[in-house]
């Protein structure tokens, strides 16, 4: 890996307006750390805030991308078609025509070719979690629907947006996540270096300068800047970097986000959406100027008077949703990202605290330094998946016919690795509002409002209601199950005559015959790890690899 001493001299290509503010750079002195060398190559004697102010004070016309976005209309790209009020239907454009018009309008602002050549993405895999399912995996590697994972959501959004150069930053319980990304997204080897794509895993590692874990989301990106900002595989340097979370469900075309960013001539742009009082205290909140669309204040998880002050601070505010909250999706210009992460001594110096995050540290610092921080309002469905209840409810939503995100939309599909498994098979079953993964066998049972993952096995006379059966890592068939019984081994799957309601059965679990898994006593919290299950926020979870004996009542 290149150190900070080298990558800055390679990739710095400032605009003329910014160049006028810079003295000549001077070489780094020998023996400095990589971070010190990077700052020495920046050639600054002034304070950090002064340097960043120089970026923010650039004339918007000096930026190469402002002119191409001058036709954007507010926060969207198309004007809304008026709805007739006289009860008569009008011959308006078809859905296909509207979609084509939207694509043409979008292409005028930010073309796919532009995005492919000039924009890179960094996806953050997150750290430890109180979610009991995170005992065995990183949150982004948790299953979504029957055969995809959370990490596939931002990667699919990037692919549809034309971003094909991505880095996934991993640290906590990362083996399954690293393996999934490596198998699912091999590098694209056709075309010129600028058009070739890749999804690289950047796992936390020790270097001569760092021997600790990442201290937060911003620290993770900062320590990988030498890789992110090098001319990787001849593809050139990114003009903009999109920072994304790996544990949220939504569909977004990042070209629209980039159009807003470029139209405002922003150094940083935050994707936001409207939230109510309950969510506001848990999120980063922005005050947005209604005329310019620029952020004037940002507060992470405010409380008391500060929370009150952030209410109704956007033109999108409503009585029920008065706050503009960050989605954890950001766009940075190359120069702004580098300077914010390498010159912020207060949060990245030797006296820095244990956690350094984009919302808590970087965004407020960018505003203090006078950078242009824009806001892109997103009006679609978005949900962060961090708690067990989030995971449970989102998966059940996906099985509903009224799901806000469809897994069956070909144009907006969530792509992932094919499992190369036999098709699912169901004999003598009653099934409603359920998703069933490949390689799954269901025999003579009732399924309603449930999700079955790949390689699941449901024996005869079972009832599965409002539940998630995560499936198994390996495919089993009747001969293999018979051999397990003959050896006295547990059979992976759900035994005959078992009822499961409002529960989750994690991977590779064996639930015996004639069991009742339904949190019968209505317990809210219980740790029964030794017995093979836990109850968290009222949801019963049979732990990965657990064996539940025949006739158990839980």
Image (cartoon, grey):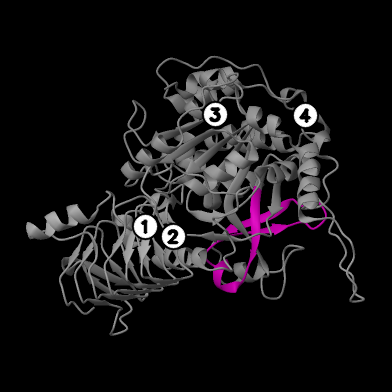
Question: Hey, which quadrant is residue 500 in on the image?
Answer: bottom left
Residue shown at 64% from the left, 51% from the top: 271
Pointer 1 residue: 129
Pointer 4 residue: 64
Pointer 3 residue: 197
Q: Of label 2 and label 1, which has the lower sequence position? A: 1
For marks 1 and 3, give the one nearer the viewer. Answer: 3
Q: Quick check: marks 2 and 1 in contact, CB under 8 Å?
A: yes
Task: Say whether residue 368 is left or right of residue 5.
Answer: right
How much space separates mark 4 and mark 3, taking CA atoms? 24 Å
On the question of residue 5 being in view, the answer is yes
Q: Of label 1 and label 3, which has the lower sequence position? A: 1
Label drawn at residue 170: none
Q: Is residue 276 magenta?
A: yes
| Residue 242 pos. (x, y %) | 59, 40
On the question of residue 264 being in view, the answer is no
Q: Looking at the picture, tell me which residue is in the foreground, 539 or 301.
A: 539
Task: Say whether residue 490 is left or right of residue 414.
Answer: left
| Residue 428 pos. (x, y %) | 36, 70
When the figure is inspected, residue 229 is found, relative to residue 507, above or below; the finding is above
How much space separates mark 4 and mark 2, taking CA atoms? 38 Å
Magenta span of residues: 270-299
How much space separates mark 1 and mark 3, taking CA atoms? 31 Å
Q: Residues within 10 Å of mark 3 (few under 14, many from 20)?
A: many
- View extreme (right): residue: 86
Q: In which quarter of the image is the N terminus?
A: top left
Q: Residues within 10 Å of mark 1 (few under 14, many from 20)?
A: some
Q: Quick check: marks 2 and 3 in contact, CB under 8 Å?
A: no
Q: How crowded is mark 4: few (under 14 residues within 10 Å), some or many (20 or more)?
A: few
Task: Say whether residue 137 is left or right of residue 397.
Answer: left
């Amino acid at each position: 890996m290149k150190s900070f001493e080298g990558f800055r001299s390679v990739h710095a290509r400032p605009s003329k307006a910014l160049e006028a503010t810079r003295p000549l750079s001077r070489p780094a002195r020998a023996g400095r750390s990589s971070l010190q060398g990077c700052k020495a190559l920046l050639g600054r004697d002034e304070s950090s805030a002064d340097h960043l102010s120089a970026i923010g004070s650039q004339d918007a016309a000096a930026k190469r991308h402002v002119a191409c976005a001058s036709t954007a209309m507010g926060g969207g790209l198309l004007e809304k078609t008026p709805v007739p009020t006289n009860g008569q239907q009008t011959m308006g454009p078809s859905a296909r025509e509207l979609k084509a018009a939207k694509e043409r309008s979008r292409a005028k602002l930010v073309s796919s070719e532009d995005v492919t050549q000039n924009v890179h993405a960094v996806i953050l895999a997150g750290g430890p979690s109180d979610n009991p399912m995170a005992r065995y995996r990183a949150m982004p590697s948790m299953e979504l629907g029957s055969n995809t994972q959370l990490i596939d959501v931002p990667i699919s959004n990037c692919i549809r947006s034309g971003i094909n150069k991505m880095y996934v930053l991993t640290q906590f319980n990362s083996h399954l996540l690293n393996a999934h990304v490596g198998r699912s997204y091999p590098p694209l080897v056709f075309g010129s270096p600028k058009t070739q794509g890749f999804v690289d895993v950047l796992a936390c590692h020790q270097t001569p300068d760092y021997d600790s874990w990442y201290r937060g989301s911003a620290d993770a990106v900062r320590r990988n800047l030498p890789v992110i900002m090098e001319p990787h595989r001849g593809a050139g340097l990114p003009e903009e970097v999109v920072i994304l979370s790996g544990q949220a469900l939504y569909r977004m075309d990042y070209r629209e986000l980039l159009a807003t960013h470029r139209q405002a001539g922003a150094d940083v742009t935050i994707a936001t959406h409207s939230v109510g009082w309950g969510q506001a205290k848990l999120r980063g909140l922005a005050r947005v100027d209604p005329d310019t669309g620029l952020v004037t204040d940002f507060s992470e998880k405010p409380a008391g008077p500060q929370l009150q002050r952030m209410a109704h601070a956007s033109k999108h505010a409503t009585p029920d949703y008065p706050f503009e909250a960050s989605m954890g999706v950001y766009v940075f210009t190359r120069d702004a990202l580098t300077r914010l992460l390498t010159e912020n001594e207060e949060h990245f110096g030797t006296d820095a605290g244990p956690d350094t995050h984009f919302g808590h540290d970087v965004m407020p610092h960018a505003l203090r330094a006078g950078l242009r921080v824009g806001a892109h309002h997103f009006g679609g469905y978005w949900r962060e998946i961090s708690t067990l209840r989030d995971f449970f409810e989102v998966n059940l939503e996906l099985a509903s016919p009224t799901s806000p995100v469809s897994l069956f939309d070909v144009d907006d599909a969530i792509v992932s690795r094919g499992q190369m498994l036999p098709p699912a098979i169901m004999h003598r079953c009653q099934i409603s509002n359920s998703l069933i993964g490949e390689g799954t066998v269901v025999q003579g049972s009732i399924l309603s409002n449930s999700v079955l993952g790949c390689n699941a096995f449901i024996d005869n006379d079972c009832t599965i209601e409002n539940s998630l059966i995560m499936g198994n890592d390996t495919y089993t068939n009747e001969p293999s199950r018979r051999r397990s019984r003959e050896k006295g081994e547990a059979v992976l799957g759900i035994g005959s005559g078992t009822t499961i309601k409002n529960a989750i059965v994690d991977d590779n679990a064996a639930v015996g015959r004639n069991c009742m898994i339904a949190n019968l006593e209505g317990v809210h919290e219980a740790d029964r790890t030794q017995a093979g299950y836990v109850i968290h926020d009222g949801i019963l979870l049979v732990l990965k690899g657990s064996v539940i004996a025949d006739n158990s009542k839980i």
